[in-house]
Image: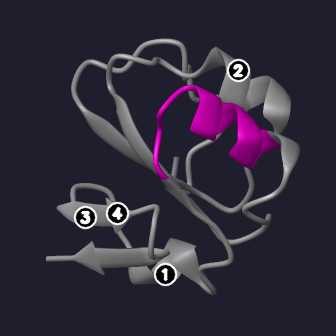
Amino acid sequence: MLGRENIKVEHFDEDTVVITKELTPSVAARLDREHTKAIVTEIGSNRSHSALLLKAMNIPSVTQVKDVDTLLKNGDTVTVNGNTGEVFAG
């Protein structure tokens, strides 16, 4: 969702790691559960409502990644480890 507005999160055409500044609970609840493979946000915590929803949906997430919108770009291959809080691009 980097730099894009009005993204339809209910359906992605392919497996997707969502990179966004913030994820609200209402958006988290609408995510395409089949194709959303992970979430990385700049704002939030691992105890937020959104994080708890993602955990219940078995979607790994990492929060508080400073400048996430400049570190990762659309099309990057990203590995997200929700257990350790690590995000790798490359």
> Mark 2 belongs to which amino acid?
Ala
Are discs 4 and 3 less than 8 Å apart at CB? yes
x and y percentages locating residue 46 in the rendered image: 72, 62
Q: Is residue 85 located in the magenta-colored stretch of the structure?
A: no
Are discs 4 and 1 less than 8 Å apart at CB? no
> Mark 1 belongs to which amino acid?
Thr
State how far apart marks 2 and 3 are (Cα): 22 Å
Q: In the rendering, which numbered label is found on residue 79? A: 3
Mark 4 vs mark 1: give the one in front.
4
Mark 2 vs mark 1: which is more N-terminal?
A: 2
Q: Is residue 52 located in the magenta-colored stretch of the structure?
A: yes
Residue at disc 2, secondary structure: helix
Residue that carries the numbered disc 2 in the rendered image: 29
Residue that carries the numbered disc 1 in the rendered image: 70
State how far apart marks 4 and 1 are (Cα): 17 Å
Mark 2 vs mark 1: give the one in front.
2
Q: In the rendering, which numbered label is found on residue 31? A: none
